[in-house]
């Protein structure tokens, strides 16, 4: 099984200010930015290289939330897996807690699932079929 760390997600109150910080101060590149009007959120991905070969940072801006406490600002770690259903079945048999079974992302088509680590931290699994 070939796994790859994809991204870490944090919630931000001011997306433009966050993008300016990560790109202007830390030298990352804005890789993509997508608005989801029906969900009232925007996802922006920044990093030091393309998403196919580098782990990146996902900045999630929920339009109706101007700020977060640091305790609830962290979202999840994401891992790419080749077959999300088989992976979740294997993880469940091994005792992992599946908090969201495999299926399309809300307001999108990417197939995802969520599990929790022993402390309750969220790990997102994203299906990435081999090319």
Image: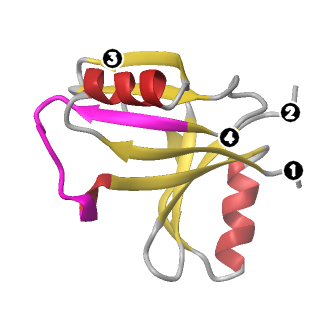
Q: Secondary structure at mark 2?
A: loop
Q: Secondary structure at mark 3?
A: strand
- Determine whether 15 is above or below 100 in the image: above
Q: Is residue 2 left or right of residue 34?
A: right
Q: Nearer the viewer, mark 2 or mark 1?
A: 1
The reply to whether the C-beta atoms of the residues labelled 4 and 3 are less than 8 Å apart is no
Q: Which residue is mark 1?
A: 2
Q: Secondary structure at mark 1?
A: loop
* Residue 65 lies in the magenta-colored region: yes
Q: Which residue is mark 3?
A: 35
Q: Which residue is mark 4?
A: 127
Q: Nearer the viewer, mark 1 or mark 4?
A: 1
Q: Nearer the viewer, mark 4 or mark 3?
A: 3
The region drawn magenta spans 57-71
Mark 3 packing: few (<14 Cα in 10 Å), some, or many (20+)?
A: few
Q: Residue at x 52, y 27 (%)?
A: 46
The reply to whether the C-beta atoms of the residues labelled 2 and 1 are less than 8 Å apart is yes
* Residue 117 lies in the magenta-colored region: no
| Pointer 1 or 4: first along the chain | 1
Q: Which residue is mark 2?
A: 130
Q: Residue at x 79, y 34 (%)?
A: 129
Q: Is residue 47 visible?
A: yes
- Counting from the top left corner in percent of width and height, residue 100 is at 46, 57
Q: CA distance from mark 2 to mark 1?
A: 9 Å
107 or 67: nearer the eye?
Answer: 67
Q: Is residue 75 left or right of residue 117?
A: left
| Pointer 2 or 1: first along the chain | 1
Mark 2 packing: few (<14 Cα in 10 Å), some, or many (20+)?
A: few
């Amino acid at each position: 099984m070939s796994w790859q760390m994809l991204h870490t997600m944090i919630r931000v109150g001011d997306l433009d200010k966050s993008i300016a910080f990560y790109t202007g101060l830390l030298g990352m590149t804005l890789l993509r930015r997508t608005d989801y009007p029906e969900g009232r959120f925007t996802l922006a991905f920044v990093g030091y290289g393309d998403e196919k070969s580098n782990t990146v940072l996902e900045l999630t801006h929920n339009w109706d939330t101007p700020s977060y406490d640091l305790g609830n600002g962290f979202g999840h770690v994401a891992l790419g897996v080749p077959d999300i259903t088989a992976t979740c079945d294997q993880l469940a048999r091994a005792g992992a807690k599946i908090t969201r079974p495999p299926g399309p992302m809300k307001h999108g088509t990417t197939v995802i699932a969520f599990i929790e680590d022993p402390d309750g931290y969220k790990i997102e699994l994203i299906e990435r079929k081999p090319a």
